[in-house]
Amino acid sequence: MTAPWWKTGVVYQIYPRSFLDTDGDGVGDLEGVRRRLDHLAWLGVDAIWLSPVFRSPMKDFGYDVADYCDVDPLFGTLADLDRLIADAHARGIRLLLDWVPNHTSDRHPWFVESRGSRTSPKRDWYWWRDPAPDGGPPNDWKGAFPPDIDAWTFDESTRQFYLHQFLPEQPDLNWENPEVVRAMHDVLRFWLDRGVDGFRIDVAHGIGKDPALPDEAPGWHGIPHAALNEHPSTHAYLRAIRTLADAYPGDRVLVGEVYQLFVRAHERYFGRNDELHLAFDLPAAIATPWEADAWRDRIADVAARLDPIGAWPTWVLSNHDTPRHHTRFGSEARARAAAVLLLTLRGTPFLYAGEEIGLEDAQVPRDRRVDPGGRDGCRAPIPWDASPTHGWPSEDAWLPWPPDAPTRNVERLRADETSIMHLYRRLLAARRASPALREGSLTLLDAPDGVLAYERRARGERFVVLVNFTREAVPCEISGRVVLSSAGTDPGRSDVLAPDEAVLVACGSSS
Ligand code: NOJ
């Protein structure tokens, strides 16, 4: 098979602040990631995506970048990152960085210079506009957070507003300016030359803006502009980035965060196989409830959008912006069944660190909340063992531990062959060993109410996956050998699906 690794592989997202601290400041670091590469190799993932580790004032915990070409001291040094890349590669694990092209930090030297005067050579690197006639912002766009914030902030010294789709400390870059394009391309080259295998692109759909800056369309007032922004110019920017990445050897990949409310059209961002290689389809991806019909519709919808253009889907259940799926779906049994689903669908699965141990969101008391977007719960530190500090150097991690950390931790679950972590490992191994699961066709099958069934097929190999979304046992004809069940290590064969059970059934060869 000649499919690139990013089609057949599985990507593991690391939120570096929460993975593992090694220097005792309560915040995870690159050395912490490096020391746990063996865990990732044991699990069997193909690549890691690091949420941003660049220099940052951390107003949005790294998504406010002050220097795209250096590592924040909180996480280590450039040399630490080089070492992590080399050590990951030595284990056959690729590494993606998180590139934030839509906005910088307000402390980035580009913005500091831009803000300096109306005649600054970098003034036009950002979106500066005069106040509206009433003295208010130039239009009615809203920022993403905190709630109900304007997407414009007035700068007293130069008497103009600047645009920010997120925090005021995250001014939007003006990609209409070719100097911005050049500078950001240089950033990509800087990292590709250092050997990174690609990028997750933050707010990929939001880079281009309508230069007329019109008010929102009727009915969209008050919704964060970042979730509505769909300007056609973005596609040309993405094509140029794709050309740049494809000029490098080794299948470098661009995975874009496409986050659309109301307009559901993430397929636009693949272009004619000349824009993104992969795209997240948010929030749909993480908003699908734990219901058979909802998943059936979603799988059909993704195929209907992507198959005609030859684009490859992504599947994701959790990330650093959303409550974890164990918390959303409400039980470990469901988190286990969801793992079977995630890792047997047609497309590239993305795991979020900690889901392999079935983490739930932490309960974060008010006085410990730090995120302006209210996303602290899913960013709780990973418990590595049962000790009071859970493998971290001190108990004082930047956020509280997730629930059950004394029992739900990597060391404990590794010792238990029936744990969810072993289930993930077996699923990853099954996927790796099977052309049908990695890159075969997917056909939805008829199934009893509350059960989702589909077939994966390639090169004469055939699997059926059955997922029982109900809390009842469901009689079900299982014609084949159950090779894996979410409910236990030795599923044997039966004609009934247990409550919340998902099974992988080998159906022998076909042609
Ligand atoms: C999407 C990222 O996932 C999120 O964490 C961040 O706050 C925004 N983009 C702004 O960069």
Image (cartoon, rainbow, N blue to C red):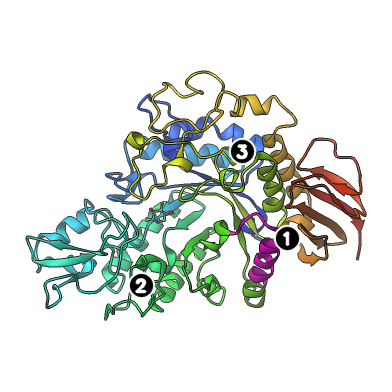
Question: Residue 381 in the image: x percent, y percent?
Answer: 47, 33
Residue at numbered disc 3: 358
Instruction: Please state which of residues 226 and 7 is positioned toward the viewer in this rendering.
Output: 226
Main secondary structure type of the part rendered in magenta: helix
Which image quarter: residue 314?
A: bottom right
Residue bearing the label numbered 2: 208
Q: Nearer the viewer, residue 342 or 441?
A: 342
Which x, y percent locates residue 375? 42, 46
Residue shown at 66%/63% (left/top)? 294
Q: Earlier in the sequence, mark 3 or mark 1?
A: 3
Query: Is residue 449 visible from the viewing direction of this image?
Result: yes
Q: Residue 439 shows which numbered tag?
A: 1
Q: Give the residues in magenta.
A: 288-303
**Image height of 402 relative to 4, above or below:** above
At a point 85% along the width and 36% down the height, the residue shown is: 490
Describe residue 33's horizontal placement relative to residue 149 as left or right: right
Q: Amino acid at mark 3?
A: Gly
Which class describes the residues within 10 Å of circle 1: few (<14), some (14-19), or many (20+)?
A: many
Observer able to see residue 15:
no
